Amino acid sequence: MARPILHNSCARATTAAESRFRIDVPIAPCRAARVIGLDDDSVQVVADAAHEPWRTARFYACDDTAEAADLPDPDDLRLRDLDRGGMRLGDELEGVDVTVMVASNDDGAAAASHIGLACSLRGITTAGLVLGSGSSVAGALASLRPYARVLLVPAEPDDLVHLLTALRA
Amino acid sequence: MLRPEINELLTETGPGTPMGELFRHYWLPALLAEELPEDDGAPVRVKILSERLIAFRDTSGRYGLMDEFCAHRGVSLWFARNEENGLRCPYHGWKYDVTGQCLEVPSEPEASNFCANVKLKSYPLVKVGDILWTYLGDPESQPPLPEYEFVHVPESQTYTSKRWQESNWLQALEGGIDSSHVSFLHSGQLNTDPLFKGSRGNDYNKGDLKPYFEVTDTPGGLFIGARRNAEEGHYYWRITPWVMPSFTMVPPRADHPVHGHIWVPIDDENCWVYTFDYHPVRPLSDDERSAMRAGHGVHSENIPGTYRPMANKDNDYLMDREAQKRNEHYSGVKGIAIQDASLQESMGPIVDRTKERLVATDTGIIKARQKLRKAVIALTDDGVVPPGVDPEHHRVRSVSVVLPHDVAFMEATAEDASVRPGVAQTTV
Ligand code: FES
Ligand SMILES: [Fe+2]
């Protein structure tokens, strides 16, 4: 049977005034976020976002489409860290919570599949932002869809910054 | 996470606030038509966007919505006599018509023209479907009336209820576009609720607790697609439209009527949840209608004579720990509407979004906040008419559908997701 327990509980303690008493402790940031641009336009958007002061996010380009096509091990995918130069995908996913892929066309289809696979093996959530409009969106969407847990279509360039801010990256 | 100033920007809707100005560009539900059932009936107090108003229906059947307080000495006109095409304040007899125009001031001489200069602020109040809609903005920019399908199908095909929610409007809306909670909070109801059960979609819902999401930007708001695994090579898609500022529709299940909500700020710490159910092509059955009245589906069972749910903050929403243990109600609270209300109210009247820890699957909520914020800025800085004002944006439907893996939901369901008179909803 339902048993109202109001008088010995804190149900009332949700008034605006009472809400001030919510314990105030620092909230941990996202452990680590990785942001990867998959083609020229996307890399530009990623580079712009990289200028903000982030705590745990790192920003990469993965725009060598020829190289990605027939790679046996997804971890060997080459990334270009926008600050630190060439990296191997597998070495950059340690302790990561979320990987955001940004695409404006289907150039990055092969890379997206490697990144999606490497992330899924490690239990890393993937998100995809599809930039632009018109027919190029369809290609970008098709390449990201299978590998992104959540997709934003079409995304505006500043959505990347808003998403990372919301995630405390 | 949101910065405190953005949380304030999005949650405060009183006169003169930026978000309040945005809301004042839309037709909003002010009451259910059933609240003013007859000419010369009882006036009703209405608080909307932090403005206190009085609604009434005069001798000639005209609806009025105006300042609640008498111009003379501020008595609430809820106590007024509704007589001979006007509301008469019982204190000293001043009388007003549906436009707020003062018609009589009995203490003044017969030949006096005093009352001509007395007018209460008033707003239009128009019946469309089962709802009385108002527009609180500048009369110059008043848009055409709403064209949501649920208020335009024949009366026999539609039902609307409402309930008072003791929280800010935005956290209630965010619950509406957050599809991932259904597999948890409402899981007990999918196979038992008379307005839900018997849909193949329910099995997909429960069989795959980690849906993938696609958030698609549209001229009027968003479409949020949640995809779950279905049979080999196929996905089960549930597509939820959001039309700005606060209209959503739940994706359909089997041939059940389709439901949705509109959230309307009462003030910054309370909102009305208008909940509708309609079928595009057939009348609601007696069983369906009585289930809705009894608070099944997404409706609530209210305290008779009020729009406050029976299960509310004062009785801990009739929490039933045993039912929680039996998995009858995942949270121990009965009914989908109260499951949502209890949790959303528990966040506090205005949830402190600086303390959130969002994840990537909250992208729909993140994008909705950005759209609201950008619309407020575009309106404030450049007078841009916000998305969702144009009635064209109202002609949307929710969709549930099974599609092959390689099909993109937005292209495949473009027709299903818009209103097609005489054509049934697309549903699984
Ligand atoms: S206060 Fe209303 S007539 Fe006096
Ligand atoms: Fe819900």
Image (cartoon, coloured by chain):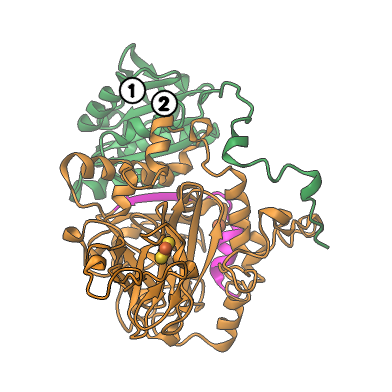
Chain colours: A green, B orange
Q: Quadrant of ligand 2?
A: bottom right
Residue found 59% across the figure and 62% down from its top: B337
- Which residues lie in the magenta part? B198-217
Query: Is label 1 in contact with label 2 (beta carbons under 8 Å)?
Result: yes
Quarter placement of the C terminus of chain A:
top left
Three-letter amino acid code at disc 1? Tyr
In which quarter of the view is residue B340 placed?
Answer: bottom right
Direction from residue B225 to residue A62 in the image, left or right: left
Q: CA distance from mark 1 to mark 2?
A: 8 Å
Q: Which residue is mark 1?
A: A60
Dot 2 crowding, Cα within 10 Å, few <14, some 14–19, many 20+: many
Q: Position of residue B198 (x, y in %)?
A: 60, 75
Task: Give residue B170's mark.
Answer: none
Q: Nearer the viewer, residue B232 or A126?
A: A126
Three-letter amino acid code at disc 2? Arg
Q: Nearer the viewer, residue A149 or B323?
A: B323
In which quarter of the view is residue B280 placed?
Answer: bottom left
Residue found 51% across the figure and 42% down from its top: B350
The residue most toward the top is A84
Q: Which residue is mark 2?
A: A34
In the depicted structure, whether residue B390 falls above or below residue A104: below
